[in-house]
Image: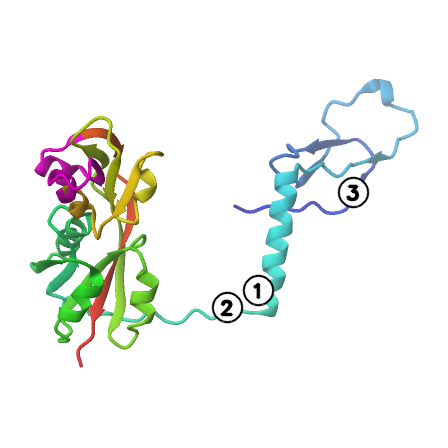
Amino acid sequence: MIIHQSARPLSVTGHTNFTSTSPARESSLTCRRTDSNDPVDRTSVGRPQRRVRAHKPRLDPSTLRLLATSERIRVSSAKYPVVIPEATCVDLEGIRHLHTLGPSGTNLESAAHAWFQRQGTVGRVTLHESLETALEQVPETGEHALVACAVYPDLHKLTFSNLQRLTMVDSFLLPTHNMVYAGLTTTPRTAATHPAPSGLVPRGVERRIVLSNSQAALDCAEGTTDACITTIVAAKRHGLQILEDFGPVPMIFTIHRVEAK
């Protein structure tokens, strides 16, 4: 969007039609001088010509903020030019084995299979108790990668503590399975939940933290808790009653290649 900032007030004399556009949308001014053939108000013929002053349009606060912001960006860019490095080529075709969070039914498992489909390749997906334990078991051949997501707990620690081993090589947006509040009773007192969606547990219900959404459903089905926050896939797999369906959640998933030694 281009915002035109108006110049100083204009002084117009003679038979001039002056047009001002909507101040809230645009601050530019347009002046058109009347030709001799244009209709003229005969009542004004012979009278002294009046000096017409064009007033500067009043800008609404939101437009003023946009102008101020664009001006700051322009000045900042002039003082501190931004250097954008050339894109780094990453060999994604070499990744044939993805490791992510289990048991089966997690959003990360679904994302792993979706990534292979997007790449047009066939690969293997192995599920682990956590990404931290997965990293301990993954061979360092360059063909293996971890699948994480933007809300995975301590992803920043996993990334920055393994800069020599892990390289984030790809990311993509994908909706999760429907997230649900499910259980064995309609009046649960306890609920198993992964840390990421724990905010979905209703007030007054005790939260019990587990390592994945699928594990939460499994614990609930075994009677460890009365309810859980899980995926609709895991809830149906374990025969749990859906107490509330939150629907799918748009999620960023990330691919971390385990570098070869």
Q: Local crowd at mark 2 within 10 Å, few (<14), some, or many (≥20)?
A: few
Q: Is residue 254 above or below residue 181?
A: below
Q: Earlier in the sequence, mark 2 or mark 1?
A: 1
Per the model, the C-alpha gap separating discs 3 and 2 is 36 Å
Which residue carries the number 3 mark?
9
Does the stretch in magenta take in 233?
yes
User: Which amino acid type is marked by label 1?
Assistant: Ser
Q: Which residue is rendered at x = 9% and y = 38% of the image?
A: 238
Relative depth, front residue between 94 and 3: 94
Highlighted magenta segment, given as a residue range: 218-241
Q: Position of residue 188 (x, y in %)?
A: 24, 31
SS class, disc 2: loop
Q: Are marks 2 and 1 in contact (CB under 8 Å)?
A: yes
Q: Is residue 46 above or below residue 205?
A: above
Which residue carries the number 1 mark?
77
The answer to which quarter of the image holds residue 190 is: top left
Q: Which residue is rendered at x = 26% and y = 65% of the image?
A: 169
The figure's colour scheme reads rainbow
Q: Earlier in the sequence, mark 3 or mark 2?
A: 3
User: Which amino acid type is marked by label 2?
Assistant: Val
SS class, disc 1: helix
- Mark 3, mark 2: which one is toward the viewer? 2
User: Which amino acid type is marked by label 3?
Assistant: Pro
Which residue carries the number 2 mark?
82
Q: How many marks?
A: 3
Relative depth, front residue between 213 and 9: 213
SS class, disc 3: loop
Q: Position of residue 261 (x, y in %)?
A: 18, 81
